[in-house]
Every structure is written in structure tokens, then in C-alpha cells.
Image: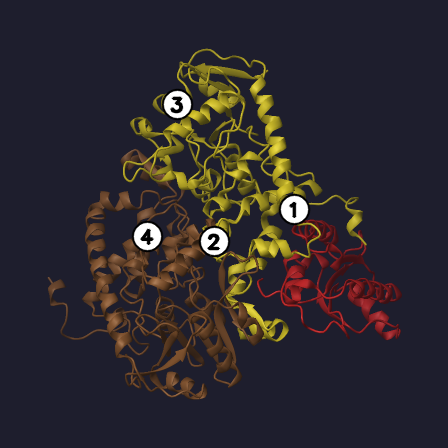
Chain colours: A red, B brown, C yellow
Amino acid sequence: MADKKKKEAGYEPKILSFCCNWCSYAGADLAGVSRLQMPANFRTIRVMCSSRVNPVYVFTALERGADGVIVTGCHPGDCHYARGNYFTRRRQALLEKVLEEIGFDRERVMLRWISASEGPEFASTMEEFDATIRSKGKNPLSEEVFL
Amino acid sequence: MKEGYKGLGVLMDAPDGPNAAIREMLRKGHERGACDAILVPMKVPSGDSYMHVLVDDVEMLDRAAPISPVLTVQGARAVTSLTRRGDEGVCIAAVMRPCEAEAVIELRKLFQVDLEHITIITMDSPGTVPLQDFARDPEEGERVFAEALATWDDSAMRPICQTCEKSNSAVGDLHLGLRGVQTGKVLLIPQGEKGLEAIAKLGLTPDHPIDEWKQASDKAMARKRGTRKANHEDLRKRASGLSGLLDLLGACINCHNCMRVCPICYCKQCKFDSPELRNTSSDYLDRADRSGSLRMPSDMLLFHMGRMSHMVLSCVSCGACEDACPTGVPVAQLFSLVAHDAQERFEYMPGRSSEEKRPLVTFEFEEFSEVED
Amino acid sequence: MTATITIDKPLDEGVRTLLRSMLEKGTVRAVLTLRRLEDGGGVAHCLVTDPAALAEAVPLLPVMPSQGGQVLSHLTQEEPFKEPVAAVVRPCEARAFVELMKRNQAFGDNLVLISPECPGVFPVQRVSGDPMDDDIDAYWRSTSEGKGADGLRPVCTGCELFEPIGVDMTLRLVGRSDLDKVLTVRLDTQRAEDMVKDLGLGKAKEDGKDPKGLEALRSARAKGRADLRAELDFTGEDMAEFSRTFGKCISCHACSKVCPICYCQMCYFEARAAAAGPAWWRNDLKRKGATRAPPGTVFFHVGRLLHMSISCVACGMCEDVCPVDIPVARIFKKVGEAAQEVFEYVPGRDPKEEIPIKTFVEDELHEVER
């Protein structure tokens, strides 16, 4: 592996979250206005539907140094576009399988359904994902030169 | 050679071989602010190849192999990938072989690289080991190359390298003379303003005459010229006429890999690889009817000849195409033959100077009357 | 019941006889087959309309100079054949063609697919120079005994789908002791039976029992597949081994160019690399102290896996053309099969089957909803 000489101490994971416009983003908003405690180390990209998230985008973030990527969308059956999130689920299954096969820790990616009313769920999901990533440490790809 | 070259260079100590000396020079240059980052071939983690790496952290230079045994990614492609969209003022010292540097200069004329902040460092090249041989047996490849570097015997290097008259060309802003230089030394030759500036930043003064290096170079290049002529005569015979050409390209499987690795073929969409050349099924059948059989994928010859007509005036004979051909077509030798003849007619040398215009974007009022009927 | 006919000429000669009579009787307008070229001794797929030009045809030559599925897609991309055309392609080529139809890159109308039970092929390097005569004799001897020949491409030795799926005629080769005397052709569709009826090649008989050798090759391939999978196991490695394997990649992208599934005129990953400006590598320099140029080599391969592995037919073209001997096809086959298993999908099995990521079932895959 690349030269691992950057300090491990004071490590703050970088987490990227994709939120669907209709459910999860509103859920995140609700968590915010409700002043719920959440880790502050995630950046959000709002997409119109979780199925907008090509697995390649998720891997792009990982290759560019993100320590974890979470995709969130409406609960199955509640998709604003009727069926989008079913496709998301298939994409996630494909992504996780490919990551597993090439030896990348698939737990660094996650799919979760969060509705507009589930502010507390959004907050707890972020807590949970942050804890998982923290326990894993730095994404090994973030320091690999030969990518 | 460029202005600023005064027939003097710096004789640097190289007790641990030229690679170590170049690494040391790069480290010093980085420390003294002669550059912000260094582009240099480096051994890959698996240890069986070399790739261009842009380095900021000088500790990593230990793994650099400025004179690498193989040409993997053509250095000009590496430079293009970094600076096609500008460089934001980052000064890069790029270490590469003369043919790679020549391609960089051609790409400058084609507006594919920004050379403003790039200092090119070239070196006398003993040639490179055929890529596919190296991939099959890296250890043997390393051994063969080390021998070539020590003895300057190029017989185990790629055929295209054996006929390269420019393998000692001082193309870069800084050139490292190795051939004919006393053992344990490297001759650093500055050229142009950039070269002199870099030398000054390194705290060096050019005070050593380069005559000895020049004589040895000229002698070696004259020998290579002889090999090239003999080689080209032979190839000219083999490739003459349609059937000769088809014979030579017979094993082509239309993968177009030669075009993909060619530094000059920078087009994102090659015309000869585009849907423009696709036909309808009825058209294909009509074409098949003409001679009873149509080779598929079609237009193999059109691809090669078309590509040749597009890029051959800028062909630097780097041999990347032949290295990448899966079926061993001597494509670099063929292109080099045509390139040599075509460039000679225009008295053009790709990579000689970035000021020089490419032959087809300029003209003189009185010329080529022989082609006017 | 499936009918077979027996042509009293062996192997290439037998197939030539079949193709010639189809062409002469006007059953088909043209045939696509491998053929030796007049110049240069090369071999290529040729669209043949003149029966005389079939003299140089080598339909069963064990080498794959281009992917037949890709060739058929080039031929029919714009419009289907208006009259019947026969094509001799290997099972993986036929499966790639089906995947291309699903992606609207080809039309199957009027196409009569003839496919052998495939004993595997030699590396593509063999298309040039020596005509491989000795090796080919040994190859057919092994095939008649139901064994894999020596010197085949590694990916072929792990191919369990060597028996054609969804074709019109199957050339029955594996495990047949009469391989050097006759060619046995199984007629898999009504269309094939109708076509052959008028060719005067003898009456169709009922298909006999599978020879023992066929069963033997099936198990040999199953073992070969397991071996390949064990050899290239990257799981639980932090991707280090995968990155190392592709470390020597020279980014020529030949693998994607020859891949039948990668039909995109402009590859997303090439476009992206071309668009990467200094902000990209400056970020890398800051984070890692160094960056490879051109960037995104490993990313290209992972990206391609994400884009096409679900349809990978493991034809091996990618590995054949790799100038630096990366086991691309073996890796793509392994990852592809793993991904395909998630959806119980076999690429090329059935043109009517949807590509998994274009469809869904409401109640499935709950393990990824975490």
C-alpha cells in the first residue's frame, strides 16, 4: 500500500451522503430544524431520486478519498417517481458485490430508506454510519498513489 | 539546438549511477524551488513495471527511475493529462526520453499541453525493452536494460530504438549526457532560458565543455542512421504495393490500440474509429458482393492509412504503437519509414522547436512545383 | 425431440460444406465466418457472399481475432438483415450478441446462428505467423476425448458455458470419436430444420445420447472455473491486491475497445479523464504527496466493472489484447459472475430477459437495505 505516514491521530472521517429530494433530504432538514445532535463530518449531495446515483459516483467519492458513502431514499413504495428506489436497491446490490469481489470493504457504503418525517432516524443513521466508519479508520484508497 | 546553449555543461558526480544522480538533482531542484512538482517514471508497487508519477513529496523520489527500462505510458500523454486544461501555475519538472519530449512539443503545437510552467529534462536513451517482453519477464527485462545502459549496445532494445537517430537529442530544457561521458559522471546540459534558469536555481555553473559528449553522440547517431537506412530499405521493399502493405498489416485485428497509445493521436473521437464509417447491413452486403467476401470489422487499411495521413508529419517514432499491438504488427517501423520520408520533404523535424509551424498549417509561395500538374 | 444431420466431411471442411450449400441454394444471402486472408496470412471474420470464397474459410480455427458478437453488431446496428444471413460464432460470441440486442445495438432478425460446442481458443497472438497446424491436430484430438487442449487461453479453461445457448444449429464436437470423419449438426430451431431440409445433406435423425467426453469436459470446466476463482481472490484485501494487479496497466483501454459489451462510442471514463483539470491532481498531491499520470487507471477498471460486468460473457478478448499481460478477462469473469449470481442472471441466455439493472422485483435484496 501507499506510503502511510499521515497522522492517524485526530482522524475525522469524511462522509458523503446522497439524499433524495423528496424524502431523505426533507428528513435531513427536519433533523436540522429539530436541532437533533448529529456528527458534523458529512457532506450532502441532493439528488432528485436515489436512483439518480450511479454506483460509479459512489466509487468516485471513495477513490477521491471519502471514507464512507451513504445513499438515502424514500421507503420502497413511497418513491416520488413510483419505482425509482427499487432500481436504487438493485444498483446498491451490484455495487456492494463488485466492491466485495475487488476486496474493498463494502461496509463503507450503505443504503437506507428515510422518509421526510423521519428526522430522528436521519440523525441516528448518521450517528451510526459515522461510528462504523470511525471504527474502520481511514479509507486505504485515500493515500494510494498508484490508482 | 536552442539559444542559450554555449557548448558548456555541468559535470555532475554520479558515483551510484545516473539514476541516483538524477534523483539527487531532482530533490535539490525541488528543495530550491526550481519546481513545485516532478513528473518522473516510478516503479509500480508490484515491482514489475514503471509509470509516470507526479511527485510533490520528495521522500517518494527514492522509488523514481528516471531512466526506466520500458516505455509504458508515453510521457507526452502523461503531460497532456496534467496540463491540457492549464496548470494553475504549478511548475513541473518532467523527466522523460527524447522521443517523449518531442511528442510533448508537437502536442504544444496542437494546443494539448501548456508548457509555460514545464521544464523538460531529457537524457541520452539507450533504448527501451519491448513492452510485452518486459511484461512477460520483468527480471530479465531489467537485466537486459542494465546491460544496455552500461554498454550502450542496443541490440536487445526495441527495433525502433535501434534505428533512432535522435536518442541522444538534447530536446529538453535540461539534457543529461551519458554517452561518452567519463564513468561515474553525468553531464548536465542546459538549453534555452528555462534550462539556464534551472541550472542557476540548482546553484550550478556550466563550465565543462560538452565536445566529448557531442562527438560520442554524433558517432553513435551516425551508426544508428546506417541501421535505419538499411532497415528502411528492407521495409520499403516488404511494404511496397497493396499486397505488400496488406501482408505487413495482415495480423491486424482492428483493436486500434496503436492509435490509443499514440501521443500524437490526441483526438477524443478518431475519425477512423467513428460511426461515420459504419454502414447499414445492406451496404455491407453490397460491399461483400464486390469481391465475394468482406473482411470484418471493415476498413482496416483505411484506418491505418487514414491515421498515417493525419499524424505522420508529427510522428516522433517513439514506438508506443508497436509496443501495444497485441498481434505484433511492425506498425511503428512502418510509420517511422513513412514519417522519415514525409518529414524530409518538408524539412520538418517534429519536436525540434515549439516555435516551428507544423508543415500543413503553413506554406511558401514558391514550393512543391513538382506536384502541380 | 431435436433433430441432427451428419455431414460426411469433418470439422472445417464439414462446416464449409454446410455453408456452401446454404449459399449456393440461396437459403442464405451471405455467411459470416472466420477466413484466412489472401494477404499476410492473417485470419478475420469475413462476410462471404460468393461460395468460391468459402474455400479459405476456417470456421472452427481456434482463435478469436475479433469478437463475433461485436462484428454482428457492427453489421446490424443500423438495420436488420432483410434476407437470411448465417453466422458461425462461438457460444460466448452468440451470448454477447444477445446482450447487444438488449442494448439496442444489434438486430437479430434473419440471422441464423451456427455455433460449435467450443473447446476453447488459443491466444490471439497466434493469428499471425505460424499456421498452428500441429497444435490444431492435438487440439482436435483432445476435443474428441473430451479433454481441454494445451495452450488455450486461461479464461477458456474455466468456461462452463461452452455449449451454445439459443442458437439455430449446434456443431457437436466435444467427445465425439468420429470427429475426424463426419460433422454432426444439431438443429435447434424449426427454422434450422426447414433450411436444412432442402440442402440435400441427408435426412435429419433424432439426436443421440450425449457422448461421455462431453460430460467429462463439463466437469473439467467446472474444476477449471473453481481454480480460476481461487487463484484471483481479492476479497478482504483493502483493494491492495486489486490495485497492484492493475498497477502496470498502461491505460491503453484496449480491453474496453475490444469488449463487445462496451459499445459506447465515448467511454464515460475516458471522457472523465480528459475533463480532469489541475484541481483534480492538485488535490491528489495535497492528499498523497504524489499522483499517477494519467490519473484514474484503477478507477477505469472498477468503473468498467460497475458498468458492464453484469453482462460480461467472459469471452476473453480483453485479456487477449492486453499488452502487459494483466489477467483482465479472468478478473472480469469472476467479478461478473458474482454480480450476475446476485440477480440469477446469465448474460445472453435469453433475448427476452431484461438486464437486471433495468428491472426489479418489489420484494427482494433486503440485505442491502441496512
Dots 2, 4 in contact, CB < 8 A: no
The residue tagged 1 is C233
Label 4 residue SS = helix
Task: Where is residue A57? Give x, y as percent.
Answer: 65, 61
Residue assigned mark 3: C22
Q: Are marks 3 and 1 on the same chain?
A: yes
Q: In this view, does C40 lie above or below B28?
A: above
Spatial distance from mark 3 to mark 4, Cα to Cα? 39 Å
Could you tell which of marks 2 and 4 lies nearer the N-terminus?
2
Above or below for C225 versus B351:
above
Residue C352 horizontal side relative to residue A38, left or right: left
Mark 2 belongs to which subunit? B
In the rendered image, which residue does mark 2 sit on?
B138
Numbered disc 1: secondary structure = loop
Of the two numbered discs 2 and 4 in the rendering, the one whose residue sits closer to the viewer: 2
Cα separation, mark 2 vs mark 3, equals: 51 Å
Within 10 Å of disc 4 (Cα), the crowding (few <14, some 14-19, many 20+) is many
Subunit ID for the residue under disc 4? B
x and y percent of residue C83 in the render? Answer: 42, 31
Task: Look at label 4 and name its amino acid.
Answer: Val
Residue type at mark 2: give it.
Pro
Give the alpha-carbon distance from disc 4 to disc 1, as whole Å: 37 Å
* Mark toward the viewer: 2 or 3: 2
Point out the frontmost of discs 3 and 1: 1
Residue where numbered disc 4 is placed: B331
In the image, which is nearer the foreground, mark 3 or mark 4? 4
Q: Mark 1 lies on which chain?
A: C
- Estimate the x, y position of residue B316 in percent, counting from the top left: 32, 64
Badge 3: chain ID: C
Mark 1: amino acid: Asp
Instruction: Please state which amino acid type lies under the numbered disc 3.
Output: Met
